[in-house]
Image (tube, rainbow, N blue to C red):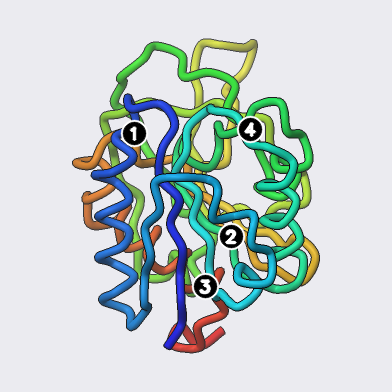
Amino acid sequence: MKQALIVQGGWDGHYPKETSAIMAEALRGQGFEVEVADTLDGLRDGERLKQLSLIVPQWTMGHIEADQLNPLLEAVRSGVGLGGIHGGMGDAFREQTEYQFAVGGQWVAHPGGIVTYSVQIEDVRSAITRDLDDFEVTSEQYYMHVDPVVEVLATTVFEGIAAKPVVMPVTWTKTYGEGRVFYCSLGHTPDVLELPPVLAMVTRGLVWAAKDRSLGV
């Protein structure tokens, strides 16, 4: 059985326990054995981490020690999947640039706060986004620094913040060493994560990162 570790904590405004529970349930529905931890200390055991299929950080902001971060990064470089959502993965451990490099991006701002915006599916052939249509969501619209090597699966457009519209990745994949990395900037609150297209995209993305062959990839 594939094993996943979700590490929840950090800023409470992103509902780490509630959103982690949603992702844990989704993964269990895909046949994963899931452990949910409330501390970063479990990341210190690098050999154990390398036995996992997937690590999901759900830890907005916060601080991570070198002996917690380095085993995490080494596990992903060795082939363990890394996947997550919103600030729990895309705005964690702000001083750790190597972590941001592994993720493929870092949150910058969400102009306007809670707004209604469109998400456009860009890659209709991907196992993560196939059969999904463009949709609207009312939530934070993440403006991010993004690694140009990421494979963009979904985008959103920012109007009125620059001389021309800005197309911003919402969902992407990349590799870090031998590990697959999945990220989706949606999921500010549990109700957003539970929207059918969002939950489908996130569940598929986590499964993909774990190299689960049920997706056919």
Q: CA distance from mark 1 to mark 2?
A: 19 Å
Q: Nearer the viewer, mark 2 or mark 4?
A: 2
Q: Is residue 105 left or right of residue 113?
A: right
Q: Is residue 122 visible?
A: no
**Label 2 sits on what residue type?**
Leu
Provide the residue designation for mark 3. 208
Write down the residue under mark 4: 106
Do the numbered discs 3 and 1 sit on residues whose CB atoms are within 8 Å?
A: no
Residue 44 visible to an observer of this rendering: yes
Give me the C-alpha separation between circle 2 and circle 3.
Answer: 10 Å
Q: Secondary structure at mark 2?
A: strand
- Amino acid at pointer 1: His
- Residue in the image at 66% along x and 47% along y: 68
State the SS at label 3. helix
Please state which amino acid type lies under the numbered disc 3: Trp
Q: Quadrant of residue 129?
A: bottom left
**Mark 2 = which residue?**
82
Q: Nearer the viewer, mark 1 or mark 2?
A: 2
Where, by quadrant of the figure, is residue 181 drawn? Answer: bottom right
Residue 129 — which label?
A: none
Q: How far apart are labels 2 and 4 at the CA level?
A: 15 Å
Tell me, yes or no, whether the two marked residues, 3 and 4, touch with CB atoms within 8 Å.
no
Q: CA distance from mark 3 to mark 1?
A: 22 Å
Q: Which residue is mark 1?
A: 188
Q: Which image quarter holds the C terminus?
A: bottom right
Residue occupying the point 53% across, 18% down? 109
The amino acid on which the numbered mark 4 sits, given as a three-letter code, is Gln
What is the C-alpha distance between the residues marked 3 and 4?
A: 21 Å
* SS at badge 4: strand
* Residue 23 on image: x %, y %: 32, 58
**Sooner in the amino-acid sequence: mark 2 or mark 4:** 2
